[in-house]
Image: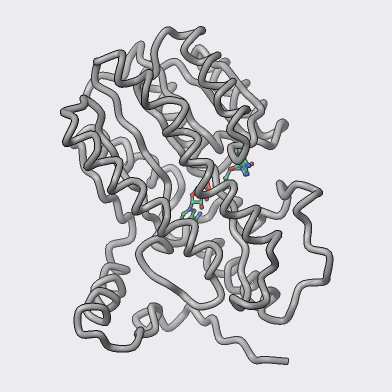
Amino acid sequence: MQEFAGKTAVITGAGSGFGREFARIGASLGMNLVLADVQADALEATAQELRAAGANVLAHKVDVSKADQVQAMADDAFKTFGAVHLLFNNAGVATGGLAWEQSLADWEWVMGVNLMGVVHGIHSFVPRMLKQGDRCHIVNTASVAGLLSAQTMAVYNASKHGVVTISEALFHDLRVTNANIGVTVLCPAFVPTGIHQSERNRPADLHNATEPTESMKAAQAASDKAVTSGKISAAQVAQMTFDAIRENRFYLVTHPKILKSVELRMQDILLQRNPSDPFSYKKDVTFSVSQG
Ligand SMILES: NC(=O)c1ccc[n+]([C@@H]2O[C@H](COP(=O)([O-])OP(=O)(O)OC[C@H]3O[C@@H](n4cnc5c(N)ncnc54)[C@H](O)[C@@H]3O)[C@@H](O)[C@H]2O)c1
């Protein structure tokens, strides 16, 4: 996709982090914006900022884990702007802890937002994008957690591995049907955003009934440190993403040093060797957890 002015972008998770930066770039390129987020005040702040900058903005309070809410937003987007050209399935949340200590509520919440959110976006937008026939592009935000399997992140890893494989299959499905839609799977490492404070948007019915375990606290502390000390900004990640859209590039790994760990994992699989520590190259990230 090369032309952006006058085209329409839909962005989930637009109230903060990467989503807000995608929206800012979209506005600067003259795009119409459909902004979605579950956090109403953050959504409204982004919408107000970009309306003041001159963009046409449709803001929808949407929980992407709910198919009917994503469908209603899609209906409104097509009704308001006539077409959708760029879809960012980006909203996401994170939890951590030993695999057997993470609750079923953790699984339901994270898989609902990170995995089913992407599924709902594809389901509600792609058929109508195909009918349009003009050039479109879909960006699914996964993570390096979709290419690796770090300790204390089973739930988040599963959701993001799911996003990577859905994106790869979507790429092939669009290819074999000669569709005019490109796909990018965005796989960042740690970037300073609100992702380590995801609990702020956890629905009441999916709160954990018990206090966090030691492993959950350790995972939260490690995530606080790693996310806040990330060296690449959300704005830089968004710029790299628009570059990938222009180049029709599928894989976008924003922190290429991590590819060493991806290669190690691939070698483990090819050699049928037991899994290596994915963070062995990065001594400042420690996820050691003592069992209390
Ligand atoms: N920041 C990182 O280090 C990092 C690394 C890899 C991948 N990611 C991924 O990037 C994406 C964006 O996250 P971010 O880092 O910008 O974090 P962020 O918390 O700043 O932004 C995420 C946005 O998603 C919204 N959201 C949460 N639950 C939602 C729901 N059910 N429906 C709709 N919106 C919802 C939040 O309100 C927030 O505005 C996520 O998918 C995340 O998993 C982040």
Instruction: Tell me what residue is drawn at x 29 percent, y 24 percent.
Output: 136
Instruction: Check the image and tell me how it is coloured.
Output: one colour
Instruction: Look at the image and tell me in which quarter the C terminus lies.
Output: bottom right
Instruction: Tell me what residue is drawn at x 31 percent, y 74 percent.
Output: 261
Q: Tally the numbered discs.
A: 0
Q: Nearer the viewer, residue 121 or 31?
A: 121
Instruction: Tell me what residue is drawn at x 34 percent, y 81 percent.
Output: 281
- Side of 240 relative to 72 (left or right): left
Residue 266: x %, y % from top left? 24, 74
Eyeballing the image, is 190 above or below 183? below
Residue 226: x %, y % from top left? 52, 68
Q: Nearer the viewer, residue 233 or 254?
A: 254
Q: Nearer the viewer, residue 217 or 24?
A: 217
Eyeballing the image, is 46 above or below 8? below
Eyeballing the image, is 227 above or below 100? above
Instruction: Look at the image and tell me in which quarter the N terminus lies.
Output: top left
- Side of 83 relative to 52 (left or right): left
Residue 9: which quarter of the image?
Answer: top left
Residue 191: x %, y % from top left? 47, 56
Eyeballing the image, is 248 above or below 96? above
Residue 47: which quarter of the image?
Answer: top right
Instruction: Tell me what residue is drawn at x 16 percent, y 35 percent.
Output: 176
Residue 199: x %, y % from top left? 71, 55
Residue 223: which quarter of the image?
Answer: bottom right
